[in-house]
Every structure is written in C-alpha cells, then in structure tokens.
Image (cartoon, rainbow, N blue to C red):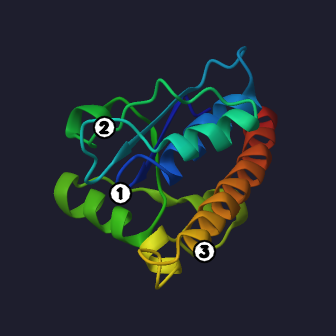
Amino acid sequence: MITSILFVCTGNIFRSVSAEYALKHHLGPETTLRIASAGTRADQGEGHWRIHEYLDRKGIASKAHRPRRVSARILAEHELVVAMGEDHRARLREEFGRDSVLFNELCHGLSTPVLDLHEAVDDWLTNERAAWDYIYRTIDYIWASSEGLAETLRRSG
C-alpha cells in the first residue's frame, strides 16, 4: 500500500498544487496517506490568488499553500513521486536519481503530460482570457482525474 505521494510541476503554483489539494479533498480527512507537492523551479512567495479562489469554489482551502522547491529531502519523504510533465520527470531522474510516474499514467494509463500554460497557449502573455480558460480547464481535469485516483487508492488500500 502506498503511504505517501508527492506531485511535482515547475513552479508549485498551479498543476501540482491542484493535484495535491484535489486528492486530499477526494480522499477526505480520514485518509492516512501523506500527500504533498513541490516544484522544480519553485520560488518563495504565494500562489496566484485566482487559482486559490477557483480551488476554493471546489471546496479546497489552498490559500495557506506556499510554493516550495523539490529537494532530495522532500523526495526521500515520499514513496510515490508523480510528475506533471516529461521535463519534471527528466529533471527528477537527472538531478536526484529518482524515478517518477506521469500524472496521466497514474490516473489514466496515458504516457502524456499535463501541459503547463506556456506549452498549451502560445499567446498566454497577451491573451489573458485564453490563459485563464486553459488554467481553469486544467484544474477541472486534475480535479476529475484525482477523484478517480482517490477511488483507486481506496480500493487498493
């Protein structure tokens, strides 16, 4: 049985945070599974208020989250490491010698990444509407995927 999961993306402000808090929500307060997130290039500070507000509408209180950078110590604390993209997977392997599974592999059996904003929306810097539409759709996708993952974990555990 898996005892801990770490979700990893780039900045630890969007994809991995959504996965962490969605899975915690779907498993409920009774879970003993430790769930966390980190970023390969996370900076100190806060996440974006609009992301926290959107998660809050789903019943997820994520405002206390602070981005953190993945480290050997954090990786050692987690049994299963879940990368949101191939770049994260490669970095974890190269920098820390740690294998990981892609989020879509774990949730759907697909060897595809959950794309970051700049990978999915070419004009994300100038087209705010398209950027936020993508972010909200991706959070919804992670939310639904995490619900299925929670059910799988309950059955296996």
**What separation in Å lies between label 3 and label 2 (alpha carbons)?**
27 Å
Could you say which quadrant of the image residue 142 lies in? bottom right
**What separation in Å lies between label 2 and label 1 (alpha carbons)?**
10 Å
Total of numbered circles in the picture? 3
Most foreground residue, 1 or 141: 141
Could you say which quadrant of the image residue 22 lies in? top right
Q: Secondary structure at mark 3?
A: helix
Specify the quadrant that holds the C terminus.
top right
Q: Secondary structure at mark 1?
A: loop
Most foreground residue, 16 or 117: 117
Q: Can you identify the residue that label 2 sits on?
A: 68
Check if mark 3's residue and mark 1's residue have beta carbons within 8 Å. no
- Which mark is on residue 130? 3
- Which mark is on residue 10? 1
Check if mark 3's residue and mark 2's residue have beta carbons within 8 Å. no
User: Which badge, 3 or 1, is on the more N-terminal residue?
Assistant: 1
Most foreground residue, 110 or 144: 144
Expressed as whole percent of the image width and height from the top left, the position of residue 112 reads: 57, 75
Specify the quadrant that holds the N terminus.
top right
Amino acid type, label 3 = Ala
Amino acid type, label 1 = Thr
Determine the residue positioned at 81% across, 40% down: 151
